[in-house]
Image: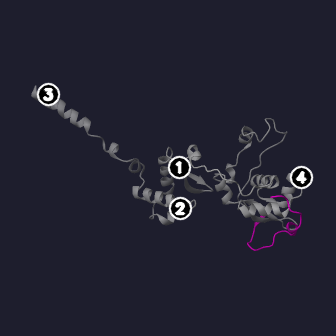
Amino acid sequence: MNRVVRLIEAEKEIDLVPDREDLQTPHEVSGINPEHLRMAEALLFAAGEPLDAKALATSLPEGADIPAILKELQSIYEKRGVTLVCVAEKWQFRTAPDLAFLLRKEQPEQKRLSRAAIETLAIVAYHQPVTRAEVEDIRGVALSKGTIDALMEIGWVKIRGRKRTPGRPVTYGTTEAFLIQFGLESVNHLPGTDELKAAGFLEALPPSGFDVPNPSDQLGPDEDPYIEGEDVEPELATGGPEPL
């Protein structure tokens, strides 16, 4: 009888001992160095601007698995008050979208973009690389120098190249600041037809043959890179100002 009791007690003790795998943290199971994870977390938390994988690799010890670390941090912060997001192929901690109202502060807007500037920004975003003449053709009206200047002053539009056509006009595209402002990972993440319809920006039945263009942040086959300091096309120096 005593032997049976001792065997039962021994079995209970064995059941109470957890497996080694149960004792491991998620980082150990995934093979991520916990210290590397903490270091990456500190770098991203303290950074004043988004960091790319190369910047993290430069600061972390050699051999750190950057993609795995970023994925793990995303998982850890998925349900937290701040989340790790990828914008313009860089990483940044941001307030969870559903908690943004807590930090919203109403204040008067110092400067408003004109309708012309908003239309031009949308055309540049979706049709880039695009020239001034192409913007005018899409809008159906002449484009003044002031409209492009306003968007470049904000930092959302830049000169990105030159078309290999007579006159070699400059081409325009959006900037990294544009992606960060609108929370986009790349220009390929701009809203598509279905999303624009859902938001009320497109009719339920758009015109026949209508399609949302595919923008690219890469140089096109008929586009040369813009060299800083080059003069832009002469026609930009003319044209009356549009309201900003």
Which residue range is magenta in the image?
223-244
Residue 179 in sight: yes
Q: CA distance from mark 3 to mark 1?
A: 55 Å
Instruction: For the residues labelled 2 and 1, say whether their Cβ atoms are less than 8 Å apart.
Output: no
Q: CA distance from mark 2 to mark 1?
A: 15 Å
Secondary structure type for disc 1: strand
- Of the 4 image quadrants, the one containing the C terminus is bottom right
Secondary structure type for disc 4: loop
Judged from this view, the residue extending furthest toward the left is 2
> What residue does disc 2 label?
47
Q: Nearer the viewer, mark 3 or mark 2?
A: 2
Q: Amino acid at mark 3?
A: Val
In front: 48, or 44?
48
> What residue does disc 4 label?
140
- Relative image position of residue 186 (x, y in whole percent): 66, 54
Residue 222 in sight: no
> What residue does disc 1 label?
83
- Relative image position of residue 155 (x, y in whole percent): 70, 62
Instruction: For the residues labelled 3 and 2, say whether their Cβ atoms are less than 8 Å apart.
Output: no
Residue 222 shown in magenta: no
| Label 2 or label 1, whichever comes before in sequence order | 2
| Label 2 or label 4, whichever comes before in sequence order | 2
> What residue does disc 3 label?
4
Secondary structure type for disc 2: loop
| Label 3 or label 1, whichever comes before in sequence order | 3
In front: 237, or 55?
237
Give the residue at x 75% y 68%.
226
- Relative image position of residue 143 (x, y in whole percent): 86, 59
